[in-house]
Amino acid sequence: MARLKGSLDKDLEKIVHVESAARALSGNYAALGVAIVFLGLSGVVAGSVSGVSSDATIVVFAAILGGYMALNIGANDVANNVGPAVGARALTMVGALLIAATFESAGALLAGGDVVDTISKGIIDPALVPDSETFVWAMVAALVSSALWVNLATWIGAPVSTTHAVVGGVMGAGIASVGFQLVNWGTMGAIAASWVISPVLGGIIAAAFLAFVKVYVIYRDDKIAAARRWVPLLVAIMAGAFAWYLCIKGLKRIWRPDDLTILVVSGGTFLLVWLVMRPLIRRQSEGMENRNQSLRILFRFPLICAAALLSFAHGANDVANAIGPLAAILHSVQAGAIAGKVAIPGWVMMIGAFGISLGLFLYGPKLIRMVGAKITKMNPMRAYCVALSAAITVIVASWMGLPVSSTHIAVGAVFGVGFFREYYTRRSRKRRQMVQRSDPSDPEIEMPQAEIAHRKLVRRTHFLTIVAAWVVTVPASAVLSAVVFYATLMVR
């Protein structure tokens, strides 16, 4: 009888696994179906606007490619904004998807602007392109290659810079169509330097904030008193940093304030939020136990606000990666000329905004889990340091005139938090004394010294995969773009 019961349990377990696999497979097909419908609608909208002509066929094809690129941006790039909050359990996956989709779309539609650069980052000189037809097919090749590369990166679980993918696509198509002299190699060198600058700077700033939080809040005898002193200040720093961040990045397409205005806005925001948060944190912390769990509660709402603001700024800034080449193609087809900046029709902006949100809902959870939980373990304090680093690093880099990638900054900040935790854990004698005073229930108190010293709090396989994807993004998308451009020559 026991043997029969054991056999029955194994059979039931196999059935459960088969049902789970079937649900996952059906979910994949449903997502693919929705994506295809969206791309079809994008083509229909482009066709209704363009009319019936040979040029309209190119516009329809470009609109479908722009929608495909927007889907991939949503699936890959947006994870950096909400992933840490999900990993810290400050947001559920559904809540993160709703917040990110809402604020990404709002950023794109409200602050995406009505004019976009046709050549990403000025890496090629459009004046050297011989005719508008060559330019149109070069932009088509750039869209195809960058979208395919981001799709591949999402499939392998690597968050990459969609801006770098578009840069590589434009560069490859430019070289294939005109030659190496078309490329601004000084600009390309600065972009290559950002592969190192962005993650290192983001990691250092995130680690510095985490060190501050650990020393002055977490490992204090009276955590609640420390939180009442420092949490309002940290939230005010976040508010001031995001005010600055939105001025220079999130709103730059509709409003370009001077340095003094930015300073006044960010300073005023810092002071106002600090004054408001002091009594709020004091009231919220009343009756809380002197435990780390209480600190997690205090950091949760500011972390959610940070995720929303990051999503807004990202939607305003990076929607151009999807619609920039599409707008360039549309202008060249309609005007028969090449322009450095072109106006964005409303329907083009809608494709970019809704494509990003839809891609996030359909395929975003995979990268959200990667960034939020699989690289290193998150809690609200660590995730807050990541979000704060993302905003401050952009400000510092802009002030220094350094080109940076928001994706590299955010993921670099996650790495920085993880590697700092490894370093801090190895200094276990001082740390264990502080933990014993502040939280005797911490399980690491009983952990053997040798085990603490060799703990790896950052998964090396994910680290190597992501770094490798960053390094090859520009050259890989460039090669793909050149191949696609040569293929179009054979077809035409």
Image (spheres, rainbow, N blue to C red):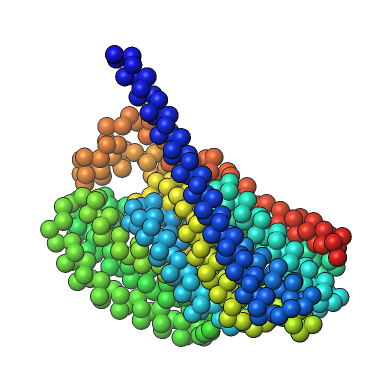
Residue at horizontal 65%, vertical 78%? Answer: 48
Q: Is residue 410 visible?
A: no
Q: Going by the image, does 287 lie left or right of 108?
A: left
- Residue 191 lies, in percent from the top left, at 66, 63
Where on the picture, by quarter, is residue 288?
Answer: bottom left
Q: Is residue 288 visible?
A: yes
- Residue 223 lies, in percent from the top left, at 21, 54
Question: Would you place residue 263 above or below residue 194 in this image?
Answer: below
Q: Nearer the viewer, residue 453 or 336?
A: 336
The N terminus is located in which quarter? top left
- Residue 2 lies, in percent from the top left, at 29, 15
Q: Nearer the viewer, residue 431 or 118?
A: 118
Residue at horizontal 60%, vertical 51%? Answer: 153
Residue at horizontal 74%, vertical 78%? Answer: 52
Question: Would you place residue 262 above or below residue 441 in this image?
Answer: below
Q: Nearer the viewer, residue 445 or 93?
A: 93
Residue at horizontal 22%, vertical 54%? Answer: 294
Question: Would you place residue 456 above or below residue 411 in this image?
Answer: above
Question: Would you place residue 245 above or below residue 459 in this image?
Answer: below
Q: Going by the image, does 134 lie left or right of 75?
A: right
Q: Residue furthest left?
A: 287
- Residue 403 lies, in percent from the top left, at 61, 67
Q: Nearer the viewer, residue 15 or 324?
A: 15
Where on the picture, by quarter, is residue 273?
Answer: bottom left
- Count of number-bearing discs: 0
Q: Going by the image, does 98 lie left or right of 190?
A: left
The C terminus is located in which quarter? bottom right
Where on the picture, by quarter, is residue 443?
Answer: top left
